[in-house]
Image (spheres, grey):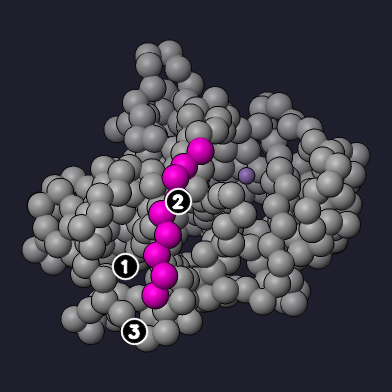
């Protein structure tokens, strides 16, 4: 097994600062997880409206939102309107191919703007993209998962956000979350200072994202918003990580896709031509991306830079 540490770069999404772990300096996706943002944890100032992401399209990917705290209203071009609250997952599937695609908006909501009465005036959310396997014909869809498998041991609380997971003690769990390739996402919240054991399966690549605070792994300290990658796993492996009470991490894994994964703006494909087509289609209001019933502004797709590597 090979391990690598990735540092975040800071970016802005819809007016709030985020830490971006993927894409990262030419590093491959982890399975089909090809984009990894962590927003927060951050409390907004009074009067601040939080994240406001205007109308924008996606192709050949799923957006996967894991809400740790705070609330976000999602609206999309196939008519879904969904508030995601803490401990819930939303998955939006853009579909595959040049006749598919979707567009959406995402905005923070609070008790006075459509959120729950106890919604936090802040946010802690992990947002990931999953590249879709392009040898499958996939239609656009949207799913909301208010209930996910969760369990405790005396050290931590675990929530399985997607996939199948067997604990090192041999208990198995299965999340209801829609998948088109094999993935796993496990949230681990330390209930006290402890060492927690995690299972890694052969044939999968894994990462651990430090969501709140950091962990110690094999004597090395990792800080919030760093990512440890685990590649070349040839046998069932148990790793042990040390965290403090309140530490929160996410174990992400997946079977590598048998295709290139190119990213530009909000688009993913295995070839440059389909990305260029999506830029043209979105900027010309092509019906494949539909309309979102929202006052938020429509974001323009930037042209591919010259020398875009494909
Ligand atoms: Mn989006």
Q: Label 1 belongs to which residue? A: 149
**Which badge, 2 or 1, is on the more N-terminal residue?**
2
Q: Check the image and report above or below for 66 versus 3.
A: above
Please report whichever mark, 2 or 3, sits nearer to the chain's N-terminal start: 2
Give the CA distance from mark 3 to mark 1: 22 Å
Q: Is the magenta stretch mostly helix, strand or loop?
A: strand
Mark 2, other Cα within 10 Å: few <14 / some 14–19 / many ≥20: some
Query: Residue 6 shows which numbered tag?
Result: 2
Residue identified by numbered label 3: 236
Residue 268 position within the rendered picture, expressed as x and y whole percent measured from the top left: 71, 56
Q: Residue 100 carries which label?
A: none
Mark 2 or 3: the one toward you: 2
Q: Residue at coordinates 74% horizontally, 32% vertically from top-left?
A: 299
* Residue 74 drawn above or below residue 176: above
Residue appearing at x 57%, y 38% in the figure: 106
Nearer to us of marks 3 and 1 is 3
Query: The N terminus appears in which quarter of the rendering?
Result: bottom left
Relative side of 296 to 87, left or right: right
Label 1 crowd bin: few (<14), some (14–19), many (20+), radius 10 Å: some
Quadrant for ligand 1 reads: top right
Q: Do the residues labelled 2 and 1 touch (CB within 8 Å)?
A: no
For residue 107, which quarter of the picture?
Answer: top right
Q: Residue at x 57, y 66 (%)?
A: 32
**Is 254 part of what is drawn in magenta?**
no
């Amino acid at each position: 097994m090979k391990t690598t540490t990735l540092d975040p770069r800071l970016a802005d999404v819809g007016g709030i600062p985020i830490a971006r772990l993927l894409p990262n300096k030419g590093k491959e996706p982890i399975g089909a997880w090809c984009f990894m943002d962590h927003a927060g944890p951050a409390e907004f100032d009074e009067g601040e409206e939080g994240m406001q992401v205007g109308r924008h399209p996606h192709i050949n990917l799923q957006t996967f939102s894991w809400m740790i705290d705070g609330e976000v209203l999602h609206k999309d071009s196939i008519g879904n309107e969904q508030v995601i609250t803490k401990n819930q997952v939303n998955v939006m599937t853009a579909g595959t191919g040049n006749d598919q695609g979707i567009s959406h908006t995402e905005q923070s909501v609070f008790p006075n703007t459509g959120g729950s009465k106890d919604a936090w005036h802040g946010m802690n959310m992990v947002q990931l993209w999953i590249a879709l396997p392009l040898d499958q014909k996939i239609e656009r869809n949207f799913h909301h998962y208010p209930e996910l498998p969760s369990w405790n041991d005396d050290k931590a609380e675990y929530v399985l956000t997607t996939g199948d997971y067997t604990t090192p003690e041999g208990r198995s769990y299965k999340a209801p979350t829609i998948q088109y390739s094999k993935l796993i996402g496990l949230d681990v919240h330390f209930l006290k200072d402890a060492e927690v054991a995690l299972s890694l399966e052969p044939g999968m690549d894994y990462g651990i994202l430090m969501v709140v605070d950091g962990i110690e792994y094999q004597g090395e300290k990792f800080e919030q918003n760093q990512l440890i990658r685990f590649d070349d796993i040839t046998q069932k492996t148990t790793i042990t990580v040390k965290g403090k009470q309140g530490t929160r991490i996410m174990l992400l894994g997946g079977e590598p896709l048998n295709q290139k994964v190119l990213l530009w703006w909000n688009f993913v494909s295995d070839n440059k031509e389909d990305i260029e087509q999506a830029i043209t289609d979105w900027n010309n209001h092509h019906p494949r991306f539909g309309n979102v019933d929202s006052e938020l502004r429509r974001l323009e797709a930037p042209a591919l830079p010259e020398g875009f590597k494909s």
